[in-house]
Amino acid sequence: MRHFTSVSQLGDWQEAFAQAQYVKQNPFADQALGKNKTLLLVFFNNSLRTRLSTQKAGLNLGMNVIVLDIAHGAWKLETERGVVMDGDKSEHLLEAIPVMGCYCDIIGVRSFARFESKEDDYNEVILNQFIQYSGRPVFSMEAATRHPLQTYADLITIEEHKTKARPKVVMTWAPHPKALPQAVPNSFVEGMKLADYDFVIANPEGYDLAPEFTRGIPVVHDQDETLKGADFVYAKNWASYDNYGQVLSQDRSWTVTTEKMALTDNAKFLHCLPVRRNMIVTDEVIESPQSLVIPEAANRVVSAQTVLKQILQSL
Ligand code: CP
């Protein structure tokens, strides 16, 4: 593997799970792979889990790790070609990227959807510029349309906790005050296809995800109906795709409550975090024994380390 931008690149899911379990049980077994190799993590957006877990993954593999927060300490970057740079942006991304490539062996990039242009976001303009101009293997730490390391950790967590071969997994939209990208839900759909679980999406009218992701997956606009018999409930907010980037609803009847969880088959609760309590999920549900949000976050080290190991092996 050279670049990693989609969980679908993992190939066979049982093999990908076995590789993750090996890394989890032997976190320091591959330190020779990363010796004298430098990992650069570039953040255009905030992060807690991705920042810490990916650094930890690199350190476990014996790598040197550098973190660059573009908004704090770097020059303000222009991203459009042809712009007369007479404003507040001092450096162009097209110089910055190859320069960053000079200082490292592998680059991780976080660049969220900007909601200025659906076309630019869905063409992954920033991530693809890193792939094109850095001269280094690049992996996504959440880009505009996908969050593959999160999804890999989600899948590992489900596989570790499932009690039947093909569990019913429901991904439900839940309310949030701000417009959030579709990267996590898009990516989760890709992961569900990879693992071939019994998968249903519940979202209100107006919140259907991009058809290129959901093709072949049932999408239901009745949350209660969908939750019946669920083994896992994956809650997430996302802004509208059709009315791109808009918040059409903050309907709190979609919040995951104890009453909603009672409709399920004693389901486990998942969320990628950070989560807005009592908007997405109630205090009672996220603090309940059914909640897997902390082991799910812990598995972010495992997913990042398994992917980084494969990239190191390809150098
Ligand atoms: N889930 C996740 O990616 O968390 P952070 O945004 O804190 O990195």
Image: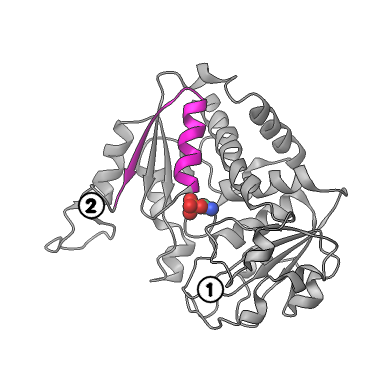
Dot 1 alpha-carbon crowd within 10 angstroms: few under 14, some 14 to 19, many 20 or more:
many
- For label 1, the SS is loop
Q: Where's residue 18, x and y in %?
A: 73, 33
Q: In the image, is residue 64 part of the stretch drawn in magenta?
A: yes
Q: Residue at x 66, y 49 (%)?
A: 154
Residue 151 marker: none
Q: Residue at x 73, y 40 (%)?
A: 12
Q: Where's residue 296, x and y in %?
A: 64, 47
Q: Quadrant of the N terminus?
A: top right
Dot 2 alpha-carbon crowd within 10 angstroms: few under 14, some 14 to 19, many 20 or more:
some
Position of 165 relative to 113 (above/below): above
- For label 2, the SS is strand
16 or 66: nearer the viewer? 66
Q: Quadrant of residue 266?
A: bottom right
Q: Residue at x 79, y 60 (%)?
A: 267
Position of 204 relative to 80 (above/below): below
Mark 1 vs ligand 1: CB under 8 Å? no
94 or 257: nearer the viewer? 257
Q: Is residue 57 visible?
A: yes
Q: Using residue 91 as the reference point, say whether residue 48 is left or right of it.
A: right
Q: Where's residue 3, x and y in %?
A: 51, 40
Say whether disc 2 or disc 1 marks the residue closer to the N-terminus. 2
In the displayed orientation, state which residue is furthest to the top. 32
Q: Using residue 1 as the reference point, say whether residue 226 is left or right of it.
A: right
Q: What's drawn in magenta, residue-wise?
A: 49-70
Q: Residue at x 48, y 79 (%)?
A: 246
Q: Is residue 141 visible?
A: no
Q: Quadrant of residue 130?
A: top left
Residue tagged 1: 176
Distance between the alpha carbons at the discs numbered 2 and 1: 34 Å
The type of residue carrying mark 1 is: His
Residue 92 marker: 2
